């Protein structure tokens, strides 16, 4: 985590963004320290993915500021992803017609680094990514993102469509990545239990606003409180 006066890996101030001139998220302010995993939770339509896409640069004009290591982050997504930000959006962010090795080469990621992270990929390097299982594709996507050594990593629904055992494997590796690389990770999730197992802190979002913040260790004990926020309750958590 950030300390000794160092700038956070990721800092967002007063972010307002949306689509077609209509704001979906409002005045979002958050930070992620180096080596820290911050979960962004909420039900479908709460504004989680919009927040992530605005930070990543996929949306057009918006208000607010995004900083990575204290430096303002500007420009479209393709420029941001080439710099100090890693982006892994919902779904399988791989090129299915290319082999596993070619997917890694395209991102200038050493296959040895990827297979050290996920040994399951080693015998699959010559296979087309499209024939890998959903879990293997997500491992490839995560290894390709982490292997570029970003300071901040944005991840949308890493667990989407995967079996619980695979999700636990991915999230466990994500914890190791944060600790070993010092990257700050902003993880969008819908499942409270998945976030509880990996997040240092959690932000709860509803109707485009961050309604509560709490340590990840408190998630399960405060699940009923979180459910009220998911359903639009106004008695936000302290």
Image (tube, grey):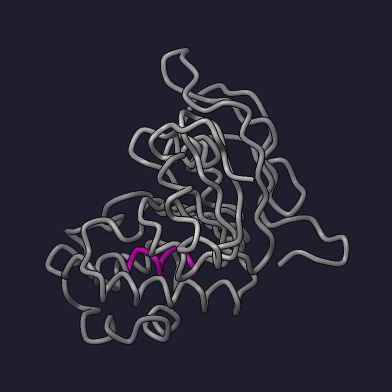
Q: Is residue 221 magenta?
A: no
x 87%, y 60%: residue: 5
Count of marks, rendered view = 0
- 128 lies above or below 117: above
The correct choice, above or below, for 168 with respect to 76 in the image is: below
> Splitting the image into 4 quarters, where does residue 111 fall?
bottom left
Q: 101 and 170: which one is in front?
A: 170
| Left or right for 157, reference 200 | left
- Left or right, 209 with respect to 195, comes to right
Percent position (x, y) of residue 160?
Answer: 27, 56
Q: Residue at (51%, 50%) from the top-left corner?
A: 81
The magenta stretch is 140-147
Quadrant where the image shows the C terminus: top right
Viewport quadrant of the N terminus:
bottom right
Please provide percent x and percent y for residue 46.
Answer: 42, 34
- Residue 100 image-quadrant placement: bottom left
Nearer-the-camera pick, 129 or 31: 31
Residue furthest top as drawn: 21
Q: Residue furthest left?
A: 131
Query: In the visual, does 95 lie left or right of 203?
Result: left
42 and 83: which is toward the camera: 42
The spot of residue 146 in percent (x, y) is 49, 67
| Above or below 90: residue 23 | above
């Amino acid at each position: 985590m950030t300390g000794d006066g160092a700038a956070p890996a990721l800092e967002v101030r007063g972010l307002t963004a949306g689509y077609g001139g209509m704001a979906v998220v409002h005045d979002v302010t958050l930070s992620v320290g180096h080596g820290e995993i911050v979960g962004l939770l909420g039900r479908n339509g709460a504004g989680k993915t919009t927040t992530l896409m605005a930070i990543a640069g996929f949306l057009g004009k918006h208000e607010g500021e995004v900083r990575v290591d204290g430096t303002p982050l500007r420009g479209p997504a393709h420029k941001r992803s080439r710099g100090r930000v890693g982006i892994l959006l919902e779904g399988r962010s791989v090129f299915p017609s290319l082999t596993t090795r070619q997917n890694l080469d395209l991102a200038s990621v050493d296959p040895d680094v990827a297979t050290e992270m996920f040994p399951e990929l080693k015998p699959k390097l010559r296979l087309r990514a499209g024939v890998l299982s959903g879990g293997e594709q997500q491992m490839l996507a995560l290894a390709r993102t982490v292997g570029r050594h970003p300071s901040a990593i944005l991840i949308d629904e890493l667990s989407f469509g995967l079996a619980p055992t695979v999700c636990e494997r991915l999230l466990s590796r994500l914890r190791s990545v944060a600790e070993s690389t010092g990257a700050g990770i902003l993880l969008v999730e819908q499942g409270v239990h998945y976030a509880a197992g990996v997040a240092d802190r959690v932000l709860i979002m509803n109707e485009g606003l961050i309604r509560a913040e709490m340590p990840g260790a408190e998630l399960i004990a405060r699940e009923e409180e979180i459910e009220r926020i998911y359903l639009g309750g106004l008695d936000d958590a302290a």
